[in-house]
Image (tube, rainbow, N blue to C red):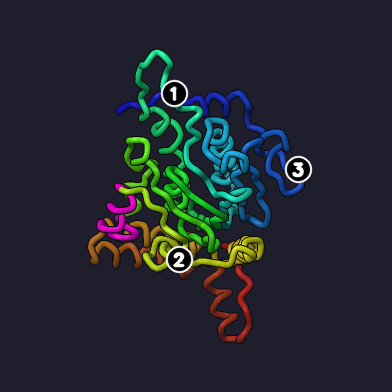
């Protein structure tokens, strides 16, 4: 299947490379981002999906802005983590269907084009970032919005949050990586039921299934965002990166291959400043002051 040229890429090229200019904690000029908010502070990027009136559903403009934010972070040698959340009462309702209406003349649309042009790059780039990607889920995640959550390395969800695999309701299958993530996280039986019937999965269910890391009270959303950001900014970034790489690789490796990978990564970590600092701090019975190096 060949990828079609993306409108998101066209918007990105037209906008030019403004992301190197920083205004306060905002990366780029304030007008660069209209459907997300993006800050980069102490090495931690924070992306807030920002279409609360449409439950932060994806558009081509939002995809272009997400791509620009990822460009900035991928080029930052001091990157230490990424946190993703949403504005308002929902995390992300998936694709904005107003951009995907059937043609009035009854002609059919190739739905794979937007997957190739927008969703594949977004999901694969998030998985490839050499730092933890943490989702702080502030509300419902449906369709491709749920796939975005599952692409993150760690997920916190407020108590009122819900996952909905809504694709079957409009005659489609889960996409944006959903059919890959779901069975690996919760097993084939739960994945199949959630995908076929589109029933809402509560945050408490998601935690018990192993779909997410932790449920937090709704009124702890801001504190969770702050705590996660601070943890990433002060953490052992190289060790985080190695852990992420090893755990993601494990499902495709034999035990022998995984041992080889652990040996290689542990050898590299043994030469880092953070390892020396961690050992000194342990001996001196004090908190470590990791530099991320």
- Marks 3 and 1: in contact by CB < 8 Å? no
Residue under label 3: 23
Q: Is residue 153 magenta?
A: no
Q: From mark 3 to mark 2, how far is it between C-alphas?
A: 39 Å
Q: Please identify the quadrant where the C terminus is shown.
A: bottom right
Which of the marked residues, 1 or 2, is nearer the chain's N terminus? 1
Taking the spot 26% from the left edge, 62% from the top edge, the residue there is 257
Mark 1 vs 2: CB contact within 8 A: no
Give the residues in magenta: 183-196
Q: Residues within 10 Å of mark 2 (few under 14, many from 20)?
A: some
Q: Nearer the viewer, residue 130 or 164?
A: 164
Q: Is residue 195 magenta?
A: yes
Asked whether the beta carbons under mark 3 and mark 2 sit within 8 Å of each other, the answer is: no
Query: Which of the two labelled residues, at mark 3 and mark 2, occupies the earlier sequence position?
Result: 3
Alpha carbon distance from label 1 to label 2? 40 Å
- First in sequence: mark 1 vs mark 3: 1
- Percent across and percent down for residue 249 are 33, 57
Res. 82 in view:
no
Name which quarter of the figure residue 173 lies in.
Answer: top left
> Considering the numbered disc 1 on the image, is that residue within a helix, a strand or a loop?
loop
């Amino acid at each position: 299947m060949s990828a079609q040229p993306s409108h998101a890429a066209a918007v990105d090229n037209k906008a030019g490379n403004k992301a190197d200019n920083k205004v306060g904690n905002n990366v780029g000029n304030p007008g660069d981002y209209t459907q997300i908010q993006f800050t980069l502070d102490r090495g931690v990027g924070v992306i807030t999906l920002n279409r609360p009136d449409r439950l932060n559903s994806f558009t081509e403009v939002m995809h272009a802005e997400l791509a620009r934010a990822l460009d900035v972070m991928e080029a930052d040698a001091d990157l230490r983590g990424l946190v993703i959340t949403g504005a308002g009462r929902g995390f992300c309702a998936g694709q904005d269907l107003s951009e995907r209406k059937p043609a009035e003349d009854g002609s059919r649309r190739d739905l794979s084009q937007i997957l190739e042009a927008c969703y594949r790059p977004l999901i694969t780039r998030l998985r490839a970032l050499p730092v933890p990607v943490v989702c702080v889920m502030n509300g419902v995640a449906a369709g491709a919005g749920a796939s975005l959550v599952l692409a993150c390395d760690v997920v916190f969800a407020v108590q009122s949050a819900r996952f909905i695999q809504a694709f079957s309701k409009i005659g489609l299958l889960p996409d944006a990586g959903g059919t890959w993530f779901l069975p690996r996280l919760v097993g084939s039986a739960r994945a199949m039921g959630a995908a076929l019937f589109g029933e809402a999965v509560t945050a408490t269910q998601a935690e018990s299934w192993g779909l997410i890391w932790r449920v937090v009270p709704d009124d702890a959303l801001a504190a969770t965002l702050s705590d996660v950001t601070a943890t990433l900014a002060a953490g052992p970034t190289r060790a985080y990166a190695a852990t992420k790489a090893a755990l993601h690789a494990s499902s495709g490796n034999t035990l022998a291959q995984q041992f080889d990978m652990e040996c290689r990564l542990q050898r590299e970590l043994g030469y880092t400043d953070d390892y020396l600092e961690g050992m000194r701090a342990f001996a001196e019975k004090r908190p470590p002051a990791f530099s991320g190096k």
